[in-house]
Amino acid sequence: MTIQELNLIHPIGSIYETLDTSFNPNTAWGGTWSNDNSGAVLVSRQSGNLFDAAAGTVVGSDTATANLPSHTHTASVSAPNNGSTTWFNIRGGGGDPGGWGNGTWTLASKGSGTAHENRMRSMYVMRWIRTA
């Protein structure tokens, strides 16, 4: 491949991904390529986004610890007009869908506060970035 073809097809800053672990664009195509071993998922920039970062910046963490602390979901029902009970209807809790009552109920306890796997379903590839 000529340098003109390389510049047209893979300009500096281009990313090339392959499943071929033996492929090296430095020897196959020329130019200067750097093997990206950051282990990061690519995300497009969104201008003005609070969490936006400069192109090429790796953000996030390899592990997540205590991202979901132990907590409880509750529901409260108050009888109208100073009544003693009222009908309540709870959906999606997996238990009794409703009944007569007045007060506060624990719907579910969630989270353990322990480390957990936090990666999305992924496929590992060889990623090369043209630097010159």
Image (cartoon, rainbow, N blue to C red):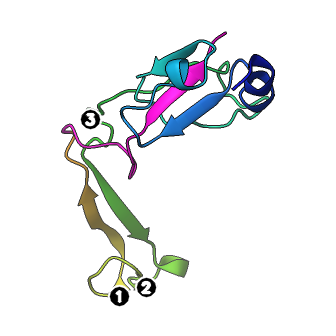
Q: Which residue is mark 2?
A: 89
Residue 20: mark: none
Q: Position of residue 14 (x, y in %)?
A: 67, 26
Whole-Å distance between the Cαs marked 2 and 3?
A: 32 Å
User: Which residue is at the front of the view, 112 or 80?
Assistant: 112
71 to 23, vertically: above or below:
below
Q: Position of residue 105 (x, y in %)?
A: 30, 69
Q: Is residue 121 magenta?
A: yes
Secondary structure category for the residue under label 3: loop
Secondary structure category for the residue under label 2: strand
Q: Which residue is mark 3?
A: 66
Is the residue marked by circle 2 packed among few (<14), some (14-19), or many (20+) residues within 10 Å? few
60 to 70, vertically: above or below:
above
Q: Are marks 1 and 2 in contact (CB under 8 Å)?
A: yes
Rendered residue at 46%/20% (across/down): 35
Residue 1 in view:
yes
Rendered residue at 34%/70% (across/down): 103
Q: Quadrant of residue 7?
A: top right
In this rendering, which labeled residue sits more in front, label 2 or label 3?
A: 3
Secondary structure category for the residue under label 1: loop
Magenta highlight range: 114-132
